[in-house]
Image: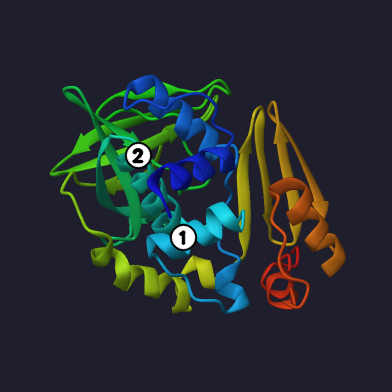
Amino acid sequence: MERGDWVARYLRRIGFEGEPKPDEATLARLHRAHMLSVPFENLNIPLGFPVETTLETLFDKVVVGRRGGFCYELNHLFGHLLKTLGFKVDLLSAGVWSQGRFGPPFDHLLLAVHLADQRFIADVGFGDSFREPFPILGEARDSLGVAYRVNRRGETLVLQQQKPDAPWVDQYRFTLEPQTIDAFQPMCRYHQSSPESSFTRRCICTMATADGRTTLANGRLIRTTAGTRTETPIVSEADFRAVLAEHFCVELPAEVSLTPLRSINEPSPKA
């Protein structure tokens, strides 16, 4: 596929209008457009389809097929778009904070984008996260009042999030050493196959909205709008398909049974 056609189709996919330039304003617009258009989701894993990280496969899935993905997919593809547009981009390794500790290296893939004499942290593959990049070792606050910052902790950097009237919470720690996509393959295989991975134990599809977030998880549609949260149980396969199509523009083939998605999303019994 010609470079111009590849870029044009990607930009249409995320609803980006205008002429992209390798500058801070364009980076912010591209990142925000991606967060509002492409869901963070792991549907292929419980459905038994392998997660592949070649650029051709990712383009077919995310752009042509209008699907989403997780970090190894979304940030790798978005990073390539940025490089194609003239940005200098590094793939970075991170360990995600979970259950009182940080995960191992390559647990998460994020991006560092070089602009003038600064590096910006960019990440369209972490679900509920910042909507626009900001300078590494800087701080940002989005329109919904959620703050983000990166601070140095020993030899690593730590991304933190602070929701309104709440304390700062660690998200992941990372280093600035550039990596290749091949270095992430062992952890990518782990997250789609190990019973210890959260991605094999639950199904999630989530996407930012202009005034909040919409999430399908644990057998419920969860919508947060201007700080107000509502939950709706998803009972049937037809309802599951309707929710994916209406809220995430995801349409899975009719011949693919969604039973694995529904069973893995069964709500836990209340005590």
* Pick the front one: 237 or 140: 237
Q: In which quadrant of the rendered image does the N terminus lie?
A: bottom left
| Residue shown at 69% from the left, 67% from the top | 265
**What type is the residue that disc 2 sits on?**
Leu
Answer left or right for 112 relative to 26: left
Answer left or right for 247 relative to 49: right
Residue 202 shows which numbered tag?
none
Q: Write down the residue under mark 2.
A: 82
Q: Is residue 220 left or right of residue 195?
A: right
Work out whether residue 236 can be spotted. Answer: no
Quadrant in the picture for residue 209: top right
Residue for badge 1:
58
Instruction: Check disc 2 and report its element: helix, strand or loop.
Output: helix
Near mark 1 (Cα within 10 A), the count class, few <14, some 14-19 or many ≥20, is: many
Residue 90, x across and y down, in percent: 23, 45
The type of residue carrying mark 1 is Leu
